[in-house]
Amino acid sequence: MTAEADPDFPPVETIDGTLDEDNRLKADFVDQVLDAVEAGNREEAYRLAQPLHAADIADLFELTPREDRAALAIALGDLLSADVLAEINDWVRDDIVDALPAAQIADLAEQMETDDAVAMIEDMEEDEQQAVLAELDPEDRAVIEDALSYPEESAGRIMQRELVAVPEHITVGQLIDYLRENQDLTTEFWEIFVVDPAHRPIGTCQLSWIMRTPRNISISDVMKREQTLIPVDMDQEEVALRFQKYALISAAVVDDAGRLVGVITADDVVHIVQEEAGEDILRLSGAGEGDINEPIADSYKARVRWLIANLGTAMVASFIIAQFGAAIETMVALAILMPIVASIGGNAGTQTLAVTVRALATNQLTQSNTVRSIWREVRVAVLIGATVAVIAGLGAGLVFTNWTLGGVIAAAILFNILIAGLSGVAIPVFLDRLDQDPAVSSSIFVTMITDSMGFLIFLGLAVFAGLAG
Amino acid sequence: MTAEADPDFPPVETIDGTLDEDNRLKADFVDQVLDAVEAGNREEAYRLAQPLHAADIADLFELTPREDRAALAIALGDLLSADVLAEINDWVRDDIVDALPAAQIADLAEQMETDDAVAMIEDMEEDEQQAVLAELDPEDRAVIEDALSYPEESAGRIMQRELVAVPEHITVGQLIDYLRENQDLTTEFWEIFVVDPAHRPIGTCQLSWIMRTPRNISISDVMKREQTLIPVDMDQEEVALRFQKYALISAAVVDDAGRLVGVITADDVVHIVQEEAGEDILRLSGAGEGDINEPIADSYKARVRWLIANLGTAMVASFIIAQFGAAIETMVALAILMPIVASIGGNAGTQTLAVTVRALATNQLTQSNTVRSIWREVRVAVLIGATVAVIAGLGAGLVFTNWTLGGVIAAAILFNILIAGLSGVAIPVFLDRLDQDPAVSSSIFVTMITDSMGFLIFLGLAVFAGLAG
């Protein structure tokens, strides 16, 4: 049988009947496991989950209802490994960790890489955290306490301490011998860091360069001196941008004195980019930072705060409408049409806002092109505004057989889209200059402006045109 | 001088006065270069840009106004390298590529890794593409034509062909000798793939494992047999999810017959995740896929389509208001308050929508937890709805000294937030089941529902409560 004639060769490793075509656990399989857990049949649950990859066991916990997770954890026993906990959603891990004794968490933490252990321990309550730290052996405790001393979401929290650093005078042969002889060195590394006597990095060697070089060549002739160093207190979002900009696979982390203290690898950065880009959508929509696993009380708090702020801006808009009460009484068509002007303006503003927030987050929009970008959005807004205004004006004129009304709504829509475009780019840029996160509060301001101005311009023009009151 | 006493040690490589603290090119520096270009002083522009990293030269082009990019390209000459073009924004690259002769593009393509060359060539017009392909040497042309035969945004487009594959019977020593002796092998690789005689991958070795192993050990004793294989036609979004789920640094790409054809590395995946997550924000906001470098005509087309759809949904809402014209004439307070109900509903819907779209995009929301997620959103909506309803009801009751009106607006807000929560999760889930991208069209539907239902419930209840008309 040749390779070409083998249609059954599985292109992706799959466990029969467990994963669907998108590599997600099948609902049937999850139900099977949960039925076994519910029936008290731990052996069956264990048997089913045993062939799974750690990342899929993590998914299994995420797909299990909150109240059944403790029972699943008990049934799976040692399958709930350090690798599983490293892959699991933060909220779900909190649930599981809460149910485990401190000694068991400490055991798991000792098997994890530093960054994963820190991610697990940093979210725990202060007293539980202390209990776990007390159970760790002194060396691991020191490493984790050191990591916890850096700000949340900084390079110091996400870096691994396990790395290989060598002085520059050794040869390729000496390096390989050193790696073979020292069995307590880490086995997972992608680059060798070359350091000076003060432990400051002076170059990096990809392993592939070393493997292609004869034994007698000096490391200093193989290494690349130009490298991207990550300060230990750098925010993870900034770290991700560096990795993206310079297409890095791993990078050295240095302390204030420039000494090598850790390494960050691209697989961790993939997680961070996913997380940070997701946060931008959620913040822009006022949904806090929550995912579907967030406790309801937290979701409630984050979202209700936003909607109350929104109630405030809607009241400003209502106040403006109230000034035109007499006009509306005279001509009820104004009340019928006014939400169109506000709605179109709001949506146009959101479009510009989304483009601007992304450009700021990816460092594409800087001082050099701010004026140009604003001007660009204004030109787009004029084109869009003119198109939508003509359609809406013709529509309103025909339906109400009143061409003055058609002209008023057309003019109001054009102006409001212009205002939306301008504020959609200017407000996030301004907030960014003030070192505020533009994704968090821009849309409240932009919506307030497009709602209020929409009503004001439309109703104001109607009165001015002599349509009513 | 000790390391600790050296406060001037730069923690990140910087070129004096060129980069700001966020690693972006300073506006002053960009102006200096552009002034030199404008003054016809090519040598000065070249001198300024020469110390820059390729990624920063790419940024320089992005920050240059569109009409000046050709002049900058001429001034920088050979500084416009393959690496620069690989790092540059797609739209900006199109501008530059349009200005270069086919032979020069072919030269640059030959220096690039396959995936970067494909990214450059795939966006060109058909006839220019053919011209460039004709200039390539036959081997490179075959590779790029092969890549172009796969669907856009598939693994086949983003993989590199340069990789190291060996049979399983060789030893670590033989592998290292093979790497040292074959100077035409790629120098950039992170894993060795072990293949069977039909060139199908049977295992992978991280280079670090090989370097830590004595020469006489067989590769088959070092390699890991369990590996994630990427089918060549898999969508890049799915590829990114695999990398994230299994924390991969690199992965083998296989064709339909299971043969090893390429490799994808985590640095490319970082770009993809950034791009895909960004697309979700932009699509959810109806801004197409555009960034600030997109040509105005393209931005116009993407956005105006959305706003015209939005005009349609706003007209549905207006039609509903029109049914209550008599009520509004009797009680103008209804016109004043009705936008509040619609606005709060729209925002609550957007919150749920953002959470749901992210959960779908990251494979967190599957058939197993759909019902649970809907039920979760309903409970959050009840809590939020009750809170906002009480505040708005008390406010309206006090301002208009009309407690029936207060009760009506409170009930309308509560109902509308419930509807918003339900549709915010149900609509994207439903679209996802139909294999539609939930980020693209969900928000049009959700907004239409929250607007229309907001007006209908509020005005309907007002009439029912005998307030008006």
Image (tube, coloured by chain):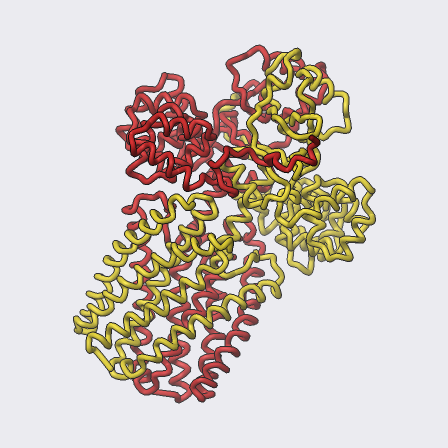
Chain colours: A yellow, B red
Query: Seen from this angle, which residue lies furthest front?
Result: B1
Could you tell whether B148 is left or right of A162 in the image?
left
Name the residue rendered at 79%, 53% in the picture.
Answer: A130
Q: Is residue B255 above or below residue A422?
A: above
Residue A357 falls left or right of residue B218: left
Rendered position, B138 above or below B469: above
Q: Residue A39's image quarter? A: bottom right
Quarter of the figure with residue A213: top right
Where's the C terminus of chain A, which quadrant? Answer: bottom left
Q: Is residue B30 visible?
A: yes
Compare residues B391 and A51 and report the one nearer the observer: B391
Nearest the eye: B337 or A175: A175
Task: Give residue B64's position: percent from left, percent from top.
Answer: 35, 38
Q: Where does residue B279 sit, x and y in percent of width and height?
A: 43, 47
Image position, residue B403 (x, y; %): 47, 87
What residue appears at the point 69 percent right and 36 percent down from the top-left corner? B5
As displayed, is residue B457 above or below residue B103? below
Q: Is residue A399 above or below residue A251?
A: below
